[in-house]
Amino acid sequence: MGTVSELCVSSLQTFLCPAVKPVEQPPVPDDLSPEEKQELENIRRRKQELLEDIERLKNEIAEVTSEIENLGSSEERKTMQRNKQVAIGRKKFNMDPKKGIQFMIENDLLKNTSGDIAQFLYKGEGLNKTVIGDYLGERDDFNIEVLKKFVDLHEFTDLNLVQALRQFLWSFRLPGEAQKIDRMMEAFAQRYCECNQGVFQSTDTCYILSFAIIMLNTSLHNPNVKDKPTVERFISMNRGINDGGDLPEDLLRNLYDSIKNEPFKIPEDDGNDLTHTFFNPDREGWLLKLGGMYTCSSPTLVHLSNLQCFWWSAMLLFSSFKQNHIHSEGFWAPHLSINSFDLQMLSV
């Protein structure tokens, strides 16, 4: 026996605990009025409908959960496969940049556009900085376009030239080939002048001063260089480079002090190139491969083996392959006049 309320509670418990299989319905008590019997019958019928609804929802939830799990596993597998291909592509790039990029394009990891490739190189995740520099310095039209996009990703606005060079030279390592360095530094100078209009009269000024700063870094921080250039000497060496005019002394002093207080820091790679000397001044070795010749304006062949001459000889290395930037009556003529040279930095 039981009252209608007790039967309702029992039905509610069964509803709230659907995992418990419902027991066989007891017979309707005889002592209930017709109205109570009808109410009990309605409750039992509704309970059965709810249990069926719950069971159906459970099945639907189980199906959706299974689909989500399968979808998650599938996406996870795709992500793992993509990451694996990216890792392979990076390794291929570090061995041969063109083959590495081609592999990533063929596997839909990169778009075959200069902008997308430039972004890939700019992020530089897992990429050899020396290889990035070699690729950017190539003279193919497409590589030059990638270089332009790569440089455009750098924001130099309101940075002085040393700050901009620090940012730029951290994103890759300068290659050891003079023509590649020329193209890259020219692109840098153009970008810097775009971001800081009015600082220099022309991009040529920025180009020349950038090399002067790089050489200053070596002269100040290489222990083998005994004759350290003073700020006055640095200012004197850069007279007349601003389209025939002089740059403000305060500007040159600030650039000098910045390099003197903190040398350039370049990511370590295991390549043997010119930047070991320029940006790791403690290293000893060749500044230029023995036998390399660069043409200047005088018929004399000079072998600069005295470290006392390091500052000017290193600067001339770059001036010699950019004659259109440096005029005979300007920056270099008062100091050196030689035809070509085979520059060696001697170990002490």
Image (spheres, grey):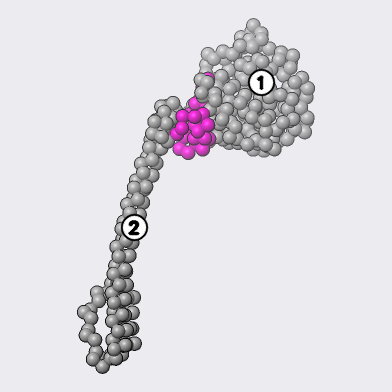
Residue 225: % across, % down: 63, 27
Left or right position of 24 against 50: left
Depth check: 299 or 199 in front? 199
- Other-residue count near label 1 (Cα within 10 Å), few / some / many at <14 / 14–19 / ≥20: some
Give the residue number, with chain letter if any, for mark 2: 64
Residue positioned 29% across, 62% down in the render: 59
Q: Is residue 121 visible?
A: no
Please report whichever mark, 2 or 1, sits nearer to the chain's N-terminal start.
2
Does the magenta run of residues contain 39?
no
- Residue visible at 32% across and 84% down? 39
Q: Is residue 187 visible?
A: yes
Residue 10 location, x and y as percent?
A: 30, 82
The spot of residue 110 in percent (x, y) is: 45, 34
* Residue 248 sits above or below residue 45 on the image: above
Q: Which residue is mark 1?
A: 312
Front position among marks 2 and 1: 2
Residue depicted at x 33% and y 54%:
67
User: The residue tagged with tag 1: helix, strand or loop?
Assistant: helix
Q: Position of residue 3 (x, y in %)?
A: 31, 90
* Position of 58 relative to 237 (above/below): below
16, 193: nearer the viewer: 16
**Is most of the magenta stretch helix, strand or loop?**
helix
Query: Label 2 amino acid?
Result: Val
The magenta span reads 110-139
